[in-house]
Amino acid sequence: MDEDSSSMRAKVLSILRYATPLLRLSASRKLLGLDHLEVYVKWEGGNPTGTHKDRAALAHVSRAVSEGATTVTVGTCGNYGVAIAYYALLAGLRAVIFVPRSYESSRVEEMRRYGAKVVLVDGTYEDAVEASARAAALKGWYDANPGSGRDSTSFQAYSRIAREIVAELGDAPYAVSVPVGNGTTMVGLYLGFLEAYKEGYATRIPRFIAASTSHANQVVESWLQGRLTPVEVPPGKVKETPVNEPLVAYRSLNAEEALRVLYETKGRAYAFSDEELVEASLLLRAVEGVSSLPASSSALLALREFAREEVPEGPLVAVITGRWLRKH
Ligand SMILES: Cc1ncc(COP(=O)(O)O)c(C=O)c1O
């Protein structure tokens, strides 16, 4: 790449900013038993590659450029890898994406279309992350994996979701519900609300609600067992499906920080079956016209559960982390 085009690309990256819509729910509230409440969805499906992972990917690729890296790598089941491939292409970097072989059919074609090299790994998501991190250490590539020591970049990128919510509502909501896999997104949102509170833009920090799959997630399993530190989830307990794969994790890479957020905000955690996730997604589409990835609809279901157990004292927000991207 010549110097002109590389400095143009760096400029494009530096001015790229996305603000996703905050949508107030109407008819679906009654069907969910939330009709007496002010409920919003923060629609992250509006990001270019369809999920909130665009935010972290843009931040990491920009950091890779500023560190002078020429290759960026990540282990992924799909969404994060597509986002990294997309922004690497924009920035003129090479992307090497490690994907568990069992997920080859998910979003791998899109990664390749954006010019990424895809390495198929025999193993789980956690194995793909390990393979990517090992390759990064060996070859001097930029490591964009959760747990790489660069988590602050992802946290900061996701903190903007919170800042946008505060800007639209004029305050923080009473509670915010977030789909949880590694817990990175939830921790980032917490830091954003904390910052808004400290700067005087919000009068409270919301209560955090973790939403995940009943086929095993370390953050939710630990919370449900009343543990402040992550419990061991035997890998055999995990059942990955095309519906739950963004959420399933026998080892959540930001579990400790995510659990701290739940305890500090008097939060709660809930887990849902694939059938419930798909149903919630269909409901959002049919009644509100909102496209949501079934895994991300867990956030809406978790609000329903929360309101069954407590009387919320203000607006509720479900972060819908992705739009419906593929056939299940
Ligand atoms: C659409 C979607 N929602 C939620 C998550 C979970 O995010 P985190 O791993 O930051 O908890 C993911 C992770 O891949 C995802 O792709």
Image: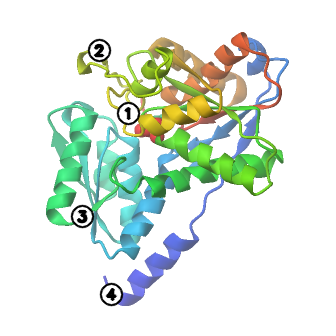
Seen in the image, is 112 located left or right of residue 57?
A: left
- Up-down: is 117 above or below 262? below
Kindly identify the amino acid type of the residue bearing the numbered disc 1. Ser
- Give the secondary structure at mark 4: loop
Res 265 → quadrant = top right
Looking at the image, tell me whether mark 1 or mark 4 is earlier in sequence order. Answer: 4
Residues at circles 1 and 4 in contact by the CB criterion of under 8 Å? no
Cα separation between marks 3 and 1: 23 Å
Q: Which of marks 1 and 4 is in front?
A: 1
Kindly identify the amino acid type of the residue bearing the numbered disc 2. Lys
Cα separation between marks 2 and 1: 14 Å
- Give the secondary structure at mark 1: loop
Give residue 37's mark: none
Asked whether residue 153 is in view, the answer is: yes
User: Which residue is at a point 59% across and 35% down the rendered structure image?
Assistant: 320
Looking at the image, tell me whether mark 3 or mark 1 is earlier in sequence order. Answer: 3
Residue 75 on image: x %, y %: 28, 45
Q: Which of marks 4 and 2 is in front?
A: 2
Q: Which residue is disc 4 drawn over?
A: 2
- Give the secondary structure at mark 3: loop
Residue 120 on image: x %, y %: 17, 42
